[in-house]
Amino acid sequence: MKKVDDNLINTYVPKNELIFSPIGGVGQIGMNFYLYGTEGKWIVVDLGITFGNSEETPGIDIILPNHEFVKRNRKNLLGIIITHAHMDHIGAVGHLWPQLQCPVYATPFAAAVLKRNLKELKIKPKFLKNISLDSNFKLGPFEIDVISTTHSIPEPNALGIKTKFGNIFHTGDWKIDPKPLVGKNFNYEKIKSFGKKGVLAIVSDSTNSNVEGHSGSEDKLKESLIKIIKKIPNRIAITSFSSNLARLETFAHVANESGRVVALCGRSLWTMYKAALDTGYLKNIKPFLDEREIMIYPKDQVLLVCTGSQGEPSAALSRIANDMHKNIFLEPNDTVIFSSKVIPGNERSITKVQNELKERNINVVTESDEFVHVSGHPSIEELKKMYNWIKPEIVIPVHGEYHHLKGNIKIAKKCGVKKGLILKNGLLLKVAPGEPKVLGSIPSGRLMLDGKKIIPINEEAIKNRKKMLYNGTILISLAINKTNKIISKPVISSKGFFNDENIKNFEKNLIANIYNYVKECKNKKIVETLLKEKIKSFSQKFFRKALDMRPIIQIHIIRI
């Protein structure tokens, strides 16, 4: 592959060629957003989110992919195809669709989840198009085979994308589960059939490319959890990804087998559960209790299924851990089971929650202690099977950090795949005809959902939030009259400082200097500008010298 062209491409009409670009989802786990183009048209596969944290994006919970390129080229956009209903694949649809205005294609369960999300955003779902499981449909120059796989949610789909210039197999999130508890079986035959047609490239899930063996079956996990929970006295809280419906059914069976009643704690769990009922899933289990109903039961009969497996501050488990939940509480010798893996980047937030629980003498069980989790992504042996079925000429690894992507290519090459391409988000790749070639880069990166407003990740407001978080704020107010005399003592307010003596010293020195600054201002027309400059300069020097801090300094001058 030729050296990357750094030219930024804002608009592009694909010619007689096959184009691929990962706008999100490469070098990370989450925010999946993939673009395919041929013969003048584009399609998008998935439009997901990732989550913010208090250190990088204080006050921001949801991070969206930058959709600028697709927005600018939307006249040639045929639609968005959703592989499955996890938030890192569909969560951005409602927020970004108003600027894209195109059809969205999804199988029934993903459509049901989307409808609930859109209802919260007060968007009518008229643009949602239901596609059948294991179906085929055409979008302009693209022919799409929808192929059922297995994952941790109903209706995960791989996409066989057929074009005049070659076929691409887009795996989506998958694993090989011989006995899935929820949804259809893995469609081996259709995948093998697509491979026999000749596959130019596979866009391949890389999450567990460094994990030996197979990912494991949900059915085997169910057996393990029953054994573990039967031995545990007192209340049990268990947490997993809220969209893991296969795990939700597992928890229901485990509760029934171990003589416990089970409640859902967290809004996103209820959203997924109701979407499952809407589409015919989870109807063979007892209905879940509301969190307000369960605390009246004896301790040894309670199983709480909670949001917050990744330590999210606003999730149910975090609030339970710091004893701030309005309906649920845990006591010493109760147990919390983390039936989930740690997503890279969430280590600190998860450890914080676990430490809060341990400090209160609540037992914590993770996958390093017991068999309490199976992944929804393929391990090495499953990836080998996929490459042997598909036999692609090129592997393009996605959905993983760099070491995952590199590991995926290593496996593919051992299976006879000739070429592996590690891309970065935003690179525009011509896959065919001829040798693959990067044409340049398109706008990518991240956007933040700040309340209802979508803003760039490097917005000045975020820089200031971080600065306030670590260095505090100083507000200085003073009133001057028409003759530029100070008519009352300046008022200084501070936030985020622990040593009142330092603030008193600052006030004393600054106020003395302010009167001198006014006298120095000979040009009465620019007195406000000069005053602000001098006050700010003095304040910055004082806090650097006294506290080695750089607070946000705001100066208000009021004319009376």
Image (spheres, rainbow, N blue to C red):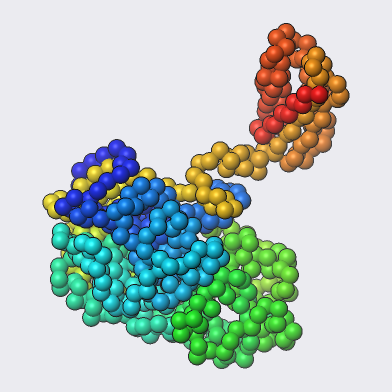
Most foreground residue, 50 or 251: 50
Q: Is residue 250 above or below residue 145?
A: below
Give the total number of marks visible in the rendering.
0
The image quarter containing residue 200 is bottom left
560 or 220: nearer the viewer: 560
Residue reaching furthest to the right: 488
Left or right relative to 135: residue 448: right
Which residue in the rendered view is the most extreme toward the top?
A: 522
Image point 58% across, 87% down: which residue? 287
Q: Is residue 79 above or below residue 513?
A: below
Q: Could you tell me residue 361's position as x and y percent? A: 71, 70
Residue 333, x across and y down, in percent: 70, 76
Q: Is residue 373 visible?
A: no
The reply to whether residue 556 is visible in this rendering is: yes
Q: Position of residue 536 (x, y in %)?
A: 68, 24
User: What residue appears at the point 82 percent right and 30 percent down from the top-left corner?
Assistant: 491
Depth check: give the residue in front, 152 or 420: 152
Residue plotted at (54% across, 63% down): 122
The residue located at (79%, 31%) in the rendering is 492
Question: In the displayed structure, does residue 336 sit left or right of residue 535?
Answer: left
Residue lying farthest to the left in this orientation: 434
Q: Position of residue 290 (x, y in %)?
A: 65, 80
Quadrant, the C terminus: top right
Please identify the quarter of the rendering in which residue 142 is found: bottom left
Q: Is residue 333 left or right of residue 96?
A: right
